[in-house]
């Protein structure tokens, strides 16, 4: 379990540092900013790369909602939930701290939202609470269905990280204007701690909505005939029981 927790810490660190770092440092860089598309791709690439790197160790969840959803889908035992979530949240907070250290090294740096998620006045497009709740639930639901399907025995071996990384990219392309895209409570927690204030006050939604979507997604995927991940897969979505 210690190795699994270390893998989840590193994977979530990379996801938060790479994805949120792209948003904070590169999205609007003068003349060469990568914009929403670049940020979406950055989040997808973090999952894809670390899934190959540590997937065989922990299952490469990097997301409390994914862990809970896979538990609902029968992929992981309940004993994994608490240690995985602790490792994921810790990785995101440390990554946000490192990102803050880098970002504040630029003269005139302004904190703003620090890649945090929000609704209403804190939404990039000023979308309502209802809109934010809906898109986060729906996006996380489909993320879990894709994860479960991409790692099922009938799926092509070795390609699951690609499908999952592209799914996360697509989710960001759709939802960045609405909530700045969460679908991951850990990723939301790290930046919100540094942004503080109203962003921390809205953090509850970015735990609640992804967890609801993931639970429903895991249950539905299992009901559709999902089976445990096969041994030839990189175990993106499923960690074997035991230490």
Image: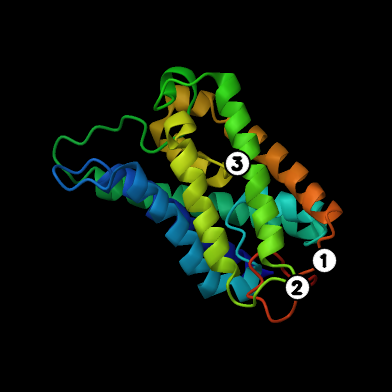
The quadrant holding residue 67 is bottom right
Residue located 85% across and 59% down the image: 225
Residue linked to disc 2: 153
Towards the viewer: 143 or 121: 143
Q: Is residue 97 left or right of residue 231?
A: left
Q: Is residue 124 left or right of residue 32?
A: right
Mark 2–mark 1 distance (CA, rounded to whole Å) = 7 Å
Towards the viewer: 173 or 91: 173
Q: Is residue 206 left or right of residue 29?
A: right
Residue 76, x across and y down, in percent? 78, 61
Mark 3 Cα within 10 Å, few/some/many (few <14, many 20+)?
A: many
Residue linked to disc 1: 227
Quarter of the picture holding the N terminus? bottom right
Mark 1–mark 3 distance (CA, rounded to whole Å) = 22 Å
**Disc 1 secondary structure class:** loop
Mark 1 Cα within 10 Å, few/some/many (few <14, many 20+)?
A: some
Tag 2 near tag 1, CB within 8 Å? yes
Residue linked to disc 3: 139
Residue located 47% across and 29% down the image: 178
Q: Is residue 230 left or right of residue 53?
A: right
Tag 3 near tag 2, CB within 8 Å? no
Residue 73, x across and y down, in percent? 80, 55
Tag 1 near tag 3, CB within 8 Å? no
| Label whose residue precedes the other's in the sequence (2 or 1) | 2
**Disc 2 secondary structure class:** loop
Mark 2 Cα within 10 Å, few/some/many (few <14, many 20+)?
A: some
Q: As displayed, is residue 72 above or below residue 4?
A: above
Mark 3–mark 2 distance (CA, rounded to whole Å) = 24 Å
Q: As displayed, is residue 126 above or below residue 232?
A: above
| Label whose residue precedes the other's in the sequence (1 or 3) | 3
């Amino acid at each position: 379990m210690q190795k699994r927790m270390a893998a989840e810490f590193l994977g979530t660190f990379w996801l938060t540092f790479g994805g949120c770092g792209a948003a904070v440092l590169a999205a609007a860089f003068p003349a060469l900013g990568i914009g929403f598309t670049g940020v979406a791709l950055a989040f997808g690439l973090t999952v894809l790369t670390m899934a190959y790197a540590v997937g065989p160790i922990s299952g490469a969840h990097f997301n409390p909602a994914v862990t809970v959803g896979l538990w609902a889908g029968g992929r992981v035992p309940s004993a994994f939930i608490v240690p995985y979530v602790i490792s994921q949240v810790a990785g995101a907070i440390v990554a946000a701290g490192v990102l803050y250290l880098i970002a504040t090294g630029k003269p005139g740096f302004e904190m703003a939202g620090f890649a945090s998620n929000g609704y209403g006045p804190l939404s990039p497009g000023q979308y309502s609470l209802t809109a934010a709740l809906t898109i986060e639930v729906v996006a996380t639901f489909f993320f879990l269905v894709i994860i479960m399907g991409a790692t099922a025995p009938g799926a092509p071996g070795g390609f699951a990280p690609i499908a999952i990384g592209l799914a996360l990219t697509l989710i960001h392309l759709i939802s960045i204007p609405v909530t700045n895209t969460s679908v991951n409570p850990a990723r939301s927690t790290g930046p919100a701690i540094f942004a503080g204030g109203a962003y921390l006050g809205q953090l509850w939604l970015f735990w609640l909505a992804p967890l609801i979507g993931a639970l429903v997604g895991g249950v539905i995927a299992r009901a559709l005939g999902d089976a445990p991940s096969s041994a030839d897969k990189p175990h993106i979505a499923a960690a074997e029981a035991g230490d």
